[in-house]
Image: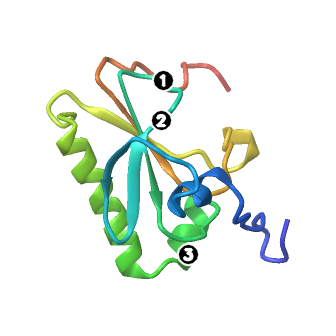
Amino acid sequence: MSVSGKPPYDPANIFARILRGEIPCKRVREDDHALAFHDINPQAPVHVLVIPKGSWVSAADFHASAPAEAIAGFWRLVGAVAAELGLEERGYRILSNMGEDAGQEVAHFHVHIFGGRRLGRMVPPGAA
């Protein structure tokens, strides 16, 4: 952990490498603030990742440190991707894992957009 309490950003992480064009991805949409692409191991009929163009390790880091236009641009792209993929009518899930206990595998803030089928409960009742 760094002095700030967050893990340091690793510029060699897979999402940083995708943003630099070193690793290909199946793009859905991209703008000045974010990139959306299909997950290589989809967990639903539609499973897209959206990553901001910057070096933020988590949602907490992104929302505390990113400029307002980057935050707004990121979330606008999330909404535009969901609409473009036809998910708004039936519904979709947005998920962001933050930290080891939540299962965050890549320390670059990102959200998953899941849709295309009934997703059910995320955490079963009484799971605590």
Query: Does label 2 or label 3 sit earlier along the sequence?
Result: 2
Q: Along the horizontal axis of the image, is 121 left or right of 104?
A: left
Identify the mark at residue 43; answer none if there is no mark. Answer: 1
Based on the displayed image, in which of its 4 quarters is residue 102 positioned?
A: top right
Cα–Cα gap, marks 2 and 3: 26 Å
Q: Are marks 1 and 2 in contact (CB under 8 Å)?
A: yes
Q: Residue at x 53, y 27 (%)?
A: 41
Helix, strand or loop status at disc 1? loop
Percent from the top left, x then y, of residue 28? 31, 45
Closer to the camera, 9 or 95? 9
Quadrant for the N terminus in the image: bottom right
Query: Does label 1 or label 3 sit earlier along the sequence?
Result: 1
Percent from the top left, x then y, of residue 110? 52, 52
Q: Residue at x 40, y 62 (%)?
A: 34
- In the displayed structure, 59 sits above or below 72; it is above
Percent from the top left, x then y, of residue 54? 53, 71
- In the displayed structure, 117 sits above or below 50; it is above
Q: Residue at x 40, y 57 (%)?
A: 35
Dot 1 alpha-carbon crowd within 10 angstroms: few under 14, some 14 to 19, many 20 or more: few
Q: Residue at x 47, y 26 (%)?
A: 42
Identify the mark at residue 64; answer none if there is no mark. Answer: 3
Residue ID for mark 2: 39
Q: Amino acid at mark 1?
A: Gln
